[in-house]
């Protein structure tokens, strides 16, 4: 990869991981509820949000494959700092 492309690849991979983690949270019992307006009861919109986020992850993977066909399925480089 070109050095200037590294940042874009890492950005896309990080966004994919973030969306996948959120989808995993929702798949394992997480809920998203919204109130249509102030004072109204909350309604569960988890399935709609999960569908949108799954599509978003697919789109990000497609973009990464187009931009970086030689390394689209590789993970981003490791973090600079490990958590303690």
Image (cartoon, rainbow, N blue to C red):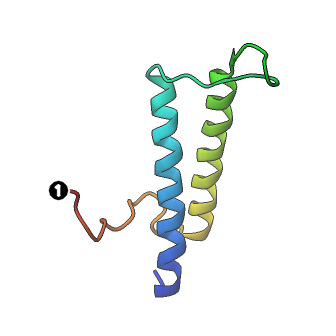
Judge from the rendering whether residue 62 lies leftward or rightward of residue 82; answer left or right: right
Residue 29 position within the rendered picture, expressed as x and y whole percent measured from the top left: 46, 19
Q: Seen in the image, is 76 located left or right of residue 62?
A: left
Q: In the depicted view, which residue is nearer to us: 73 or 33?
A: 33
Q: Which residue is mark 1?
A: 84
Callout 1: 10 Å neighbours few (<14), some, many (20+)? Answer: few
Residue at x 61%, y 45% (from the top left corner): 58
User: What is the residue that sits farthest to the left in this orientation?
Assistant: 84
- Residue farthest to the bottom, as pictured: 3
Where does the image place residue 59, in percent across and percent down from the top left?
A: 65, 50
Q: How far from the left and from the top, in percent, is residue 13?
A: 48, 59
Left or right of residue 21: residue 64: right
Quadrant of the rendering where the C terminus is positioned: bottom left
Picture residue at 54% right of the left edge, 72% below the top: 8
Callout 1: SS: loop
- In the rendered view, tell whether residue 16 sits above or below residue 64: above
The x, y position of residue 44, in whole percent, is 66, 17
């Amino acid at each position: 990869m070109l050095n200037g492309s590294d940042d874009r690849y890492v950005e896309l991979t990080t966004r994919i991981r973030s969306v996948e983690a959120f989808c995993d949270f929702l798949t394992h019992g997480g809920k998203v509820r919204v109130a249509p307006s102030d004072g109204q009861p909350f309604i569960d919109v988890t399935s709609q949000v999960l569908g949108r986020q799954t599509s978003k992850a697919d789109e990000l993977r497609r973009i990464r494959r187009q931009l970086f066909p030689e390394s689209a399925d590789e993970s981003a480089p490791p973090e600079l700092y490990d958590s303690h």
